[in-house]
Image (spheres, rainbow, N blue to C red):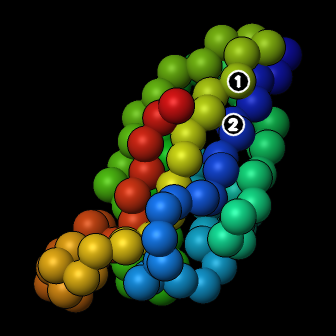
Amino acid sequence: MTATLKLTRKGFGIELRCGTFSISIDGKNAGSIELDQTAELPIEPGHHVLRISVGRHSSHERPFDVTDGEVASFRCHGTVLWPRYLASIVKPDLAISLTSE
């Protein structure tokens, strides 16, 4: 029994927070993703927590549930607006946007 996590890294404009993003599922490293890339990762059905990071900067944690055979789809991108970029210096979990699709 497996499910799939589909993560697409594509935003609008130019990312101000760039580099290779690390993918963390349930607090464990699950891979990485580059700009304009899509990663599909097999995961166990059930409840999970997703977080994307680069260095000390990250997204908010996104909890989600997935059933056998289901695909959980998310989109991420680095900061594209200067005010948010500056705020992420103080609050690092503002640096990466992570939304479900």
Mark 2: which amino acid? Leu
Q: Is residue 79 visible?
A: yes
Q: Which badge, 2 or 1, comes first in the chain's sequence?
A: 2
Q: Can residue 88 be seen in this view?
A: no
For the point 24% across and 82% down, the residue is 82
According to the image, label 1 marks what residue?
71
Quadrant in which the N terminus appears: top right
Report how far apart the C-alphas of labels 2 and 1 lie in the structure: 6 Å
Q: Residues within 10 Å of mark 2 (few under 14, many from 20)?
A: some
87 up-or-down from 28: above or below: below
Describe residue 6's horizontal placement relative to residue 74 as left or right.
right
Describe residue 79's horizontal placement relative to residue 64 as left or right.
left
Residue nearest the viewer, comparing 8 with 50: 8
Q: Residue 96 carries which label?
A: none
Residue 71 percent across, percent down from the top left? 70, 24
Describe residue 81's horizontal placement relative to residue 30 as left or right.
left
Residue 77 percent across, percent down from the top left? 50, 63
Residue nearest the viewer, comparing 64 with 16: 16
Q: Do the residues labelled 2 and 1 touch (CB within 8 Å)?
A: yes
Mark 1: which amino acid? Val
Q: How crowded is mark 1: few (under 14 residues within 10 Å), some or many (20 or more)?
A: some
70 up-or-down from 64: above or below: above
- At mark 1, the secondary structure is strand
Residue nearest the viewer, comparing 94 with 10: 10
Q: Which residue lies furthest to the top in this view?
A: 68
Residue 93 percent across, percent down from the top left? 29, 67
Residue nearest the viewer, comparing 45 with 70: 70
For the point 41% across and 35% down, the residue is 63
For the point 27% across and 67% down, the residue is 94
Residue 12 percent across, percent down from the top left? 48, 62
48 up-or-down from 3: above or below: below
According to the image, label 2 marks what residue?
5
